[in-house]
Structures are given as C-alpha cells and as structure tokens.
C-alpha cells in the first residue's frame, strides 16, 4: 500500500462563503457568455429584421419566461461585477484576513441581489 498523501478533496474542506462566491463568479460569467450572447444576437437580429421580427422578440422577452431570463442575466452581471471588484481588492494585496475575506464574500453575494432588485425596480417603476 502506498503511503503518499492524498490531494485535498471537497469533503475535507469546510465550505465557506469565499468558495460560494468563486463558484458564482464562474457560473455568472458563463451564463452571461452563453445566454447573454444568445439574447444579444437575437435582439440585434430582430432589430435588423424589421418590425415583425422585433415584435416577435419583444413578445418573448416581455413574457414571464423572458423576464426570468432577463432578470437572471441582470443578476449574473451584478454578481460577476461584485465578485470581480472583490478579486480586484484581493489582487492589490488586501482582504486576505479570514474574517475580512468572509465579510467581502458575503457583501459580494448580497450586492448582486440588491443591485438586481434596485435595477429592476427602477426599470419597472420609472
């Protein structure tokens, strides 16, 4: 039997907010790249396609499932931005203390939700 040390696994590490923010950063970036690009291309194609094509896009975008996609993309944008700002602070050498890192991680996640709610409140109530 080999007595070499095993690589750390997720079962060994205690789950923390910094791990959640890291995963959300990747998910939100991928979501914006894949879903956001699809919506952007559809919107641009509808603009170029004329009034009927744009009306079809608008019908889908303003439906309940279209709003879910648009709110999800907004959340992804604000979450990714908040996490990116957190990483910027880490890149300048600050925020590595455990409590500070945990606090910035929670603030990053909450900021994504708060900014999304504020953005859509402004859009729908203005």
Image (tube, rainbow, N blue to C red):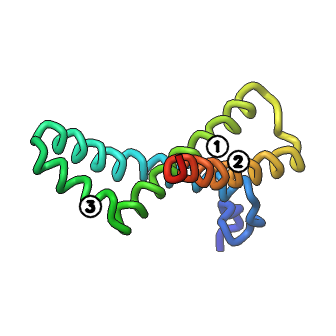
* Residue 70 x/y as whole percent: 41, 54
Q: Which disc is residue 83 wearing? A: 1
Q: How many marks?
A: 3
Dot 1 and dot 2 residues touching (CB under 8 Å): yes
Residue at the extreme top of the image, as rendered: 92
Work out whether 62 lies above or below 116.
below
Name the quadrant containing residue 1.
bottom right
Q: Nearest the camera: 33 or 126?
A: 126
Q: Nearest the camera: 36 or 98?
A: 36
Would you say 62 lies left or right of 86 here? left
Q: Which disc is residue 60 wearing? A: 3
Using a 10 Å C-alpha cutoff, classify the residue at mark 1 as few (fewer than 14 neighbours), some (14 to 19) or many (20 or more): many
Q: Nearest the camera: 48 or 87?
A: 48
Residue to which mark 2 is pinned: 108
Say whether disc 1 or disc 2 marks the residue closer to the N-terminus.
1
Would you say 47 lies left or right of 83 here? left
Q: Which disc is residue 26 wearing? A: none
């Amino acid at each position: 039997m080999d007595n070499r040390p095993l690589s750390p696994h997720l079962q060994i590490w205690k789950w923390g907010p910094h791990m959640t923010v890291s995963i959300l950063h990747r998910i939100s970036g991928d979501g914006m790249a894949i879903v956001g690009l699809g919506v952007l291309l559809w919107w641009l194609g509808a603009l170029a396609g004329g009034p009927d094509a744009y009306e079809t896009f608008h019908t889908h975008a303003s439906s309940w499932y279209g709003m879910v996609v648009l709110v999800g993309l907004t959340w992804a944008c604000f979450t990714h931005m908040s996490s990116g700002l957190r990483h910027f602070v880490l890149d300048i050498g600050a925020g590595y203390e455990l409590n500070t890192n945990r606090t910035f991680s929670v603030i990053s996640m909450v900021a994504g939700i708060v900014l999304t709610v504020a953005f859509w409140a402004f859009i729908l109530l203005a």
